[in-house]
Amino acid sequence: MSRPQCCRRISQEPPCAVFKPTSIPARFLEEIVLTLDEFEALRLADLNGLYHEQAAASMNVSRQTFGRIIDTARRKTAEALILGKALRIEGGKVEMAGMRQFKCQDCLHTWELPFGGGCPEGCPNCGGANFRRENCGGRDGGEGQIRKRCCHRGANP
Ligand SMILES: [Zn+2]
């Protein structure tokens, strides 16, 4: 059984949101947007030297998808460097790697599970099925806002 394809997993946020050439005011610069999944692909493949298979597994995507992400990321980065454009790193459908947090709506029990194990059967405290993800960390493509609810379940609060 396959999990719903929702988020590309990243394990590190960029140290800053915008890189720009010095001495050129931002209003004169053309800006290129590098999404967080593209940033993560560069970090894994080009900085850490991972094979595409390993990097794809780390991001929870197929090798083909990873290939597309890294190609786009490299082209955008090269364009910024060579043509002197600003690079803004934001957006993309991503979630931070870490523990998944669940909360039971019946008894208010909260618990955590690592990523990749599928959804729990029921609340470990009362056995009820009325629980939801608390900290998916899924981001909205446009605004980079962290959604409070998981995108797998109960997407609309
Ligand atoms: Zn419960």
Image: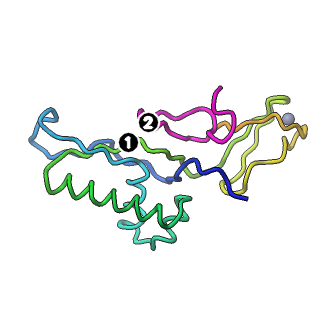
In screen coordinates, is 7 left or right of 111?
Answer: left
Q: Which mark is residue 90?
A: 1
The image position of residue 87, as x and y in percent, is 25, 46
Q: Ligand 1 falls in which quarter?
A: top right
- The kind of residue tagged 1 is Glu
Q: Main secondary structure of the magenta part?
A: loop
Which residue carries the number 2 mark? Answer: 144
Segment tinted magenta in the rendering: 135-157
- The kind of residue tagged 2 is Gly
The image position of residue 154, as x and y in percent, is 69, 33
Image vertical order of residue 104 relative to residue 6, above or below: above
Q: Earlier in the sequence, mark 2 or mark 1?
A: 1
**Disc 2, disc 1: CB below 8 Å?**
yes
Instruction: For marks 2 and 1, give the CA distance.
Output: 6 Å
- Residue at the right extreme of this rendering: 126
Residue drawn at (86%, 44%) of the image: 124
Query: In terms of secondary structure, where does tag 2 sit?
Result: loop
The image position of residue 116, as x and y in percent, is 67, 57
In screen coordinates, is 153 left or right of 105?
Answer: left
Residue 45 in which image quadrant: bottom left
